[in-house]
Amino acid sequence: MFSCRIGAVLSLRGTTLALALASALGATPLLAREMPEAGTAAAVKKPNVVILATGGTIAGAGADAANSATYTAAKVPVDKLIAAVPQMSTIANVRGEQVFQIASESFTDAQLVQLAKRVSQLLKQDDVDGVVVTHGTDTLEETSFFLDLVVKSDKPIVVVGSMRPSTAISADGALNLLDAVTVAASKESVGKGVTVTMNDYIQSGRDVNKRTNVVPSAFYSQWGPLGMVVEGKTYFFRSLAKRHNMTSEFDIDQIDSLPLVGIVYGSGNMIPGVYDAEVQAGAKAIVNGGTGNGSVPGYLVEKLKDIRAKGTIVIRSSRVPDGFVLRNAEQPDDTYDWVVAHDLNPAKAKILAAVALTKTSDTKDLQRIFWEY
Ligand code: ASP
């Protein structure tokens, strides 16, 4: 695991190299006189924030500044990400660790567990006040929800990405990262659950979804953001109503692996054999991302009843991005012993199902968990 301290970065202050690097990565570098001296009393009092880098577009690089969508993700190492945003040092003592260097679509459950264990370990330390995870945007909503469910800490955990690589004109990563450190260093963020800072907003990691794939305003929650970050200050306007972190019954210290959960995407003219394939592959639960209110086509009802009778959990979610699936509407869930995913999209329902199944496979208990988290 690569480790870097911002003190090393500060030693570059005033040099052409630091300014050139920051500018290459899309940040507006501070003038040397604006940067604080490392080791002064003010620096000692600042909160300590650890950046865990996992890759993604925020660490991406393109061939040309005009390449905002054509680039290679997961290229820039954590020390360079930190060096590109020297303004972070006015807010916190920042150090970095390179946990992975991957695009987020390549995340496996084993990596999710490894990352959460590292976050948990760090937050148990008295000399760590908050953690920032840099992450690809594709599965950022899964990782942020997972950390929200399993890390037992009130200290701020912020997951951040960018939609444009660091080499692009108007790259969004530098400001998103500065905002993430601002949130991670703020006392106001304590107990708020895992947050996501994208495009000036503070979103709940539990609620947020990636809604568009090409613009910086890609992240959205149907219940609204928690607040905003403006010029190094957090502004919170609401809190997450669901159980998370300290109020969660799950703890990454007791989880070493996750059971397999599959997703089937609802559409017209579905292929029933897909469900069998998932069961045969070892899925302990199948999230049905049904149409509308989590609907199941008439010709698939017997298939899903059969799968449930043989032991696999059936969870009704919806491919519709907003709203929530109502129990016993569209299908008699009580009669069929199915579970509904409430407002969680299929990807988030998969995360909660996997975490919940580490403790219970009782469908009443699973439904309670889907209401409460
Ligand atoms: N495919 C990239 C990833 O998720 C996209 C991004 O980071 O925006 O790693």
Image (cartoon, helix red, strand yellow):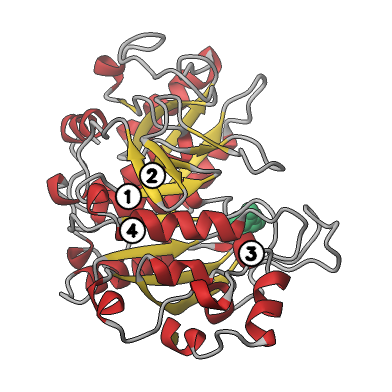
The answer to whether residue 284 shows anywhere in this view is no
Mark closest to the chain's N terminus, 4 or 2: 4
In the rendered view, tell whether residue 151 sits above or below residue 270: below
In the rendered view, tell whether residue 273 sits above or below residue 57: above
The answer to whether residue 86 shows anywhere in this view is yes
Q: Amino acid at mark 1?
A: Val
Q: CA distance from mark 3 to mark 1?
A: 25 Å
Mark closest to the chain's N terminus, 3 or 2: 3
Relative depth, front residue between 94 and 111: 94
Specify the quadrant that holds the N terminus. bottom left
Q: Label 2: which residue?
A: 205
Q: Secondary structure at mark 1?
A: loop
**Within the image, what quadrant is residue 66 found in?**
bottom right
Q: Label 4: which residue?
A: 184
Provide residue 147's location: percent of width, then percent of height: 32, 55
Q: Dot 3, how many residues are within 10 Å of its Cα: few (below 14), some (14-19), or many (20+)?
A: many
Q: CA distance from mark 3 to mark 2?
A: 25 Å
Q: CA distance from mark 1 to mark 2?
A: 5 Å
Contact between marks 1 and 2 (CB within 8 A): the answer is yes
